[in-house]
Image: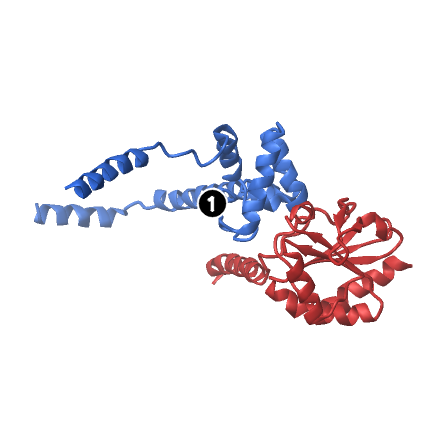
Chain colours: A blue, B red
Amino acid sequence: MKGLFALLAAFVLATGAIGKEAAPLAEDEAVEKRLLNIAEELRCLVCQNESLAGSRADLAEDLRREVRGLIKQGKTDQEVKDFLVSRYGDFVLYEPPVKPTTWLLWGGPFVLLAAGLVALFAYLRRRSGQVGKAELTEDEKQRAEALLKDNP
Amino acid sequence: MNRFLLPLGLFIVLLGFLAVGLNRDPREVPSPLVGKPAPAFELAQLHQPEKTFAPKDMLGKVWLFNVWASWCVSCRQEHPVLVEYSKKGVPIVGLDYKDQREDGLRWLKQFGDPYLLSAWDGDGRVGINYGVYGVPETYLIDKAGTIRHKHIGPITPEAMEQKIMPMMKELDK
């Protein structure tokens, strides 16, 4: 009986210990939030289809550590990105900057759209010219009327 | 006949783009550091922790800065090439990247040491400053301390013969 009571007490005490609030993962939530924001727009160089935020590669962890350090130093988002671009090149940015070497990349779709529209209008104009010419001769008209009368 | 010529031409152009795209190695990201001064640092040496190494110690020389690690498998592939060229007198400084000191030392003992010395970058900070994202990587640095070329991945005898040695000879004049 005494043993049972002790066991019961142990359970009660144990649940008290479990019911503690989970500690936050990061020490500073504001820094972590900004880190995540910046890292979403950066590419991990090891697994190139992953963002720096999502990658579990060793290098990504190191780079997140560096970015965290820069944020704590009070650097702006742009300064953090510049830090990485100066080391790894534009490739780390998921959104490439607009400059002479990327004009084709940014402008290409619009050039293709314009070319498509020009081609479409040229085609439509040519076709409407052909459609306009189709008129019935006197013989054909009489035949058409005769056919319509026969099959009301 | 004529109406097929235009789509066919466009298709061939597209094919050309795809062929070029498929034959490029996406792992070779051009380094923005080429043409810029090698980032300064001061690190403890691998063999003699009490001594340090800084890139400015090599001013006046054309040298190779090779990033390696004992955990890096493809470093084994390039290692015999480095050993061979160090015997020919090519100055190579190593950067033992994110490695345990003992592991690095054991690795050099096992495979041979082609380096004048190795700097020990335990936490990988210097690696980040050099834009290292995959070991091995090798930088060619000129007499004034400017990075002239970056080789990503294991160095092959062909890369050494066709690219790196001619550049080193040219820069050494």
Image point (23%, 36%), residue name: A9
Amino acid type at image mark 1: Gly
Q: Residue furthest right?
A: B173
Is B61 positioned to the left or the right of B71 in the image?
Answer: right
Residue B159 drawn at (x, y percent): 72, 66
Is B114 positioned to the left or the right of A27 in the image?
Answer: right
Whether residue A41 is situated above or below residue B93 in the rendered picture: above
Q: Badge 1, how many Cα within 10 Å: few under 14, some, many 20+?
A: some
Residue in the foreground of this view, choosing between B141 and B99: B99
Residue A107 drawn at (x, y percent): 56, 40
Is A57 positioned to the left or the right of B110 in the image?
Answer: left
Secondary structure of the residue carrying tag 1 is loop
Within the image, what quadrant is residue B150 found in? bottom right
Image point (64%, 49%), residue name: B124
Whether residue B54 is situated above or below residue B76 in the rendered picture: above
Residue in the foreground of this view, choosing between B173 and B139: B139
Image point (62%, 66%), residue name: B74
Whether residue A46 is situated above or below residue A66 in the rendered picture: below
Which quadrant, please, contains the C terminus of chain A?
top left
Q: Name the residue under label 1.
A: A54
Residue B78 drawn at (x, y percent): 68, 68
Residue in the foreground of this view, choosing between B112 and A119: B112
Whether residue B7 is situated above or below residue A134 in the rendered picture: below
